[in-house]
Image (cartoon, grey):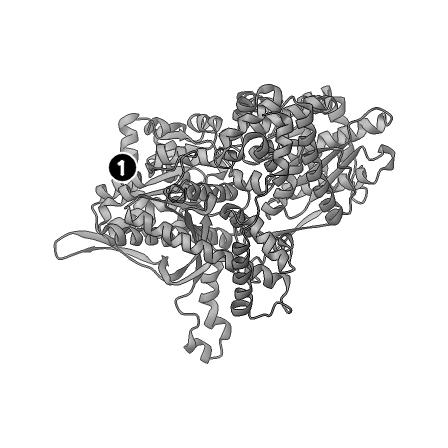
Amino acid sequence: MPVQSVFEKLQQQQPPIDELALSEIKSAILAKLTLVIGKAATQATKHDWYKASALALRDRIVHRWLVSEKESYDAGRKRVYYLSLEFLIGRLFTDALNNMGLLAQYAAALGDLGVGLNDLRKCEPDAALGNGGLGRLAACFMESMATLEIPAFGYGIRYDYGLFRQIINHGWQQEFPDEWLSFGNPWELQRPEVVYQVKFGGSVEQVTDAKGLTRAVWTPVETVQAMAYDTPIVGWRGEHVNALRLWSARAPDPMLIDVFNTGDYLGATAHEARAEAICKFLYPNDESAAGRELRLRQEYFFVSASLQDLIQRHLDSDGQIRSLAKRAAIQLNDTHPSLAVTELMRLLVDVHHLRWDDAWQITIATLSYTNHTLLPEALETWPLDLFERTLPRHLQIIYRINEAHLALAEVRCPGDIEFRASVSLIDERGGRRVRMGHLAFIGSHRINGVSAMHSDLMQETVFHDLNHLYPGRITNKTNGITFRRWLTLANPGLTNLVRAACGDEVLDDPTQLQRLEAFAGDSAFQQQFRSVKHRNKIALARLISERNGVRIDPGALFDVQIKRIHEYKRQLLNVLETVALYHAIKDEPNRDWVPRVKIFAGKAAASYRYAKLIIKLINDIAEVINNDESIGGKLKVVFLADYNVSLAEVIIPAADLSEQISTAGMEASGTGNMKLALNGALTIGTLDGANIEIRDHVGAENIAIFGMEALEVVARRAQGLDANDVVSRSPQLARAIRAIDAGAFSPDDPARFASVAHALRHLDHYMVSADFDSYYEAQRGIDARWRAGSAWTRAGILNVARMAWFSSDRTIREYAEDIWDVPTRHATQPSPARRAKG
């Protein structure tokens, strides 16, 4: 297509809006405003308009939801159940409008009513039911399952407060409750009739029945009720809708009246507070014994309620429990839902009275497990005494599973005590603990990593011996992202340009992005591409000015690192390069420096003190650099507080450079790297996680790779963690560390970052110092690419054009075919509903 034709199509992309449809939308919104909100239009606040609009939209979605449910049940289709402790779904209003194809109509209807769609969008709080990539992946997967018309349920916890709200106070992170439910949630439907009993503690005894069969009877001391709340998840074009079912905890009896009447008012509701604590916060601080117990209770609570629910649904439709594996596929998203192995066995054996061997076959055939980490410390383990006190029946089941498991290990490696200790479900070293990663592995028929490198390393490291014992179970499913949110919705300017160049079919089939390659070298198209990026950068600059009071130049290179603050993600490496660059600019202020804005965002776990110190260091460095007039604004540093999905939707389209600089061999996959590349940012990164596959797809010349590879990191660690050798050979690094150590960025407390400097010199576990020179040189190469102008833009366009493979639709299709054994609608194949319409 000639470039001129692309520009002509850009002018003609918005179809006329049907006046009848517009009238119906306005009537529906006004009806909700009057009859549900109880307000006249003249009295309504923006939040009232948002809620009325969301409820009007929800009505349309629910109709399609009910049709989707009926069709899947009538057809007897196998269902997928996705268990995740996190669902980082963000704002749903514009996401649902986009997928329903109603964005333009709602914008016009609300405009006629005197309300701005963008204003209403801001009224919706982010549903921060996740910590980062894990929860956002779950949200993308739920959307893709609906798009591919896979009957699916997501299961999680309806946290009252979700992940904490991050405030930066004098550079320090402070945590506050995230009150996302304070104004209600128009998207969810409460299901008070869907309640399950979840039991804790007590004792187990063996009882022999009249037939002489011995069975275990668990007598718990505490029961908590799980009540369901359903949120519809809309697929693309609104043709299929699935449900995200979140559980809320409550006590069976909200108040003990006899205790209340004695005057013990707090004691009368203490059991209620204990029950409700389960769903108060995402990830309670587990430094204390009480915190660890609450975390275990959370995990069992949502697993038990979810399995009881899906088994009930299966029995209602199929009538008999033995066919469960043929009709249900249960995916465990990371190690948190590992208790599904023991809970499913308990339900099958104790409640439905199956023989142990039959129940075990069903359990393995039904469950599959996604591993998200290579860090042994991140594979949860529980102290045996805590586990026995909280879930005594489940510990018995673990012992029995382990008995058969270790017998197999003895057959495979006779007399090898070390091998048996390595694969055992009970870790006997340093206090007996239950290994939850091992449990999930043993109880699942497939275990997948989330990038090619991660899956390979799983077999060589954390699950090496288990892989030897159960060969063939490990497979790879590289993560993906939903393009509907991370391109179509987050970056409408680029989406319109892509549609003009590739055709509207690109909205349904991301492989059509490859057509962009024909325009990558065209100067007129490059100018359009740069114009889109510049508008996005102006929007981000405005937000930074509003939030941080820092004025930045939209023409500067926007260098972005947005992710959870963790040592292995190496924000500290970025910080060191920032200091070194600052020193270089001060040394030669008249040199032709590329103006840069270093943009950081992310949260540190509340108990992760070192990560919080890194946040303070970033902010202290920003304070010095941003106020140093001698560098003429050539370098700015910004830390944006309270990073969430909505903030990412502003940052990602504006990014020029994507920092994916984790220590090689430690990042399982990453999905931020995919989102940024899809929006035309060039990646600077290590050969880690999905960076490797991104390099393979976009081309080695369109990505900047630096640093040691995974095996080199292992070899370097084996030599020791002292980094004085590399520090002494690197003048820039040594100077940056000295400045941090001497308090150049913390004059009020010169010793504040002494521990950081000490680690950089002597405890370089994450290879920050060891990789510094390679990273610094790669960044100077980025400067050269940026100056080239046209070459940079060409690389950005090619990144967009070659990212189609990283769609979560592709990932889910692979899960469906290789793990779940369920059919999907092909990307280019219209659904039956669309064929009927056509």
Q: Where is residue 115 in the image (x, y as percent from the top left)?
A: 64, 58
Q: Of helix, strand and loop, which one carries label 1?
A: helix
Q: Position of residue 72 (x, y in %)?
A: 32, 47
> Quadrant where the N terminus lies?
top right
Q: Within the image, what quadrant is residue 754 found in? A: top right
Q: Position of residue 509 (x, y in %)?
A: 48, 33
Q: Can residue 759 be seen in this view?
A: no
Q: Tell me: residue 374, above or below residue 343.
A: above
Q: Position of residue 219 (x, y in %)?
A: 30, 59
- Structural crowding at the residue carrying mark 1, measured as other residues with C-alpha within 10 Å and reported as few (<14), some (14–19) or many (≥20): few
| Residue nearest the viewer, comparing 475 with 517 | 517
Q: Name the residue under label 1.
A: 404
- Left or right of 715 on screen, residue 838: left
Instruction: Determine the residue positioned at 49% across, 44% down.
Output: 139
Q: Within the image, what quadrant is residue 446 found in? A: top left
> Quadrant where the C terminus lies?
top left
| Residue nearest the viewer, comparing 230 with 830 | 830
| Residue nearest the viewer, comparing 809 with 415 | 809
Name the amino acid type tagged 1.
Answer: Ala
Q: Tell me: residue 115, above or below residue 5.
A: below
Q: Can residue 8 be seen in this view?
A: yes
- Left or right of 406 on screen, residue 756: right
Instruction: Determine the residue positioned at 31% across, 53% down.
Output: 313
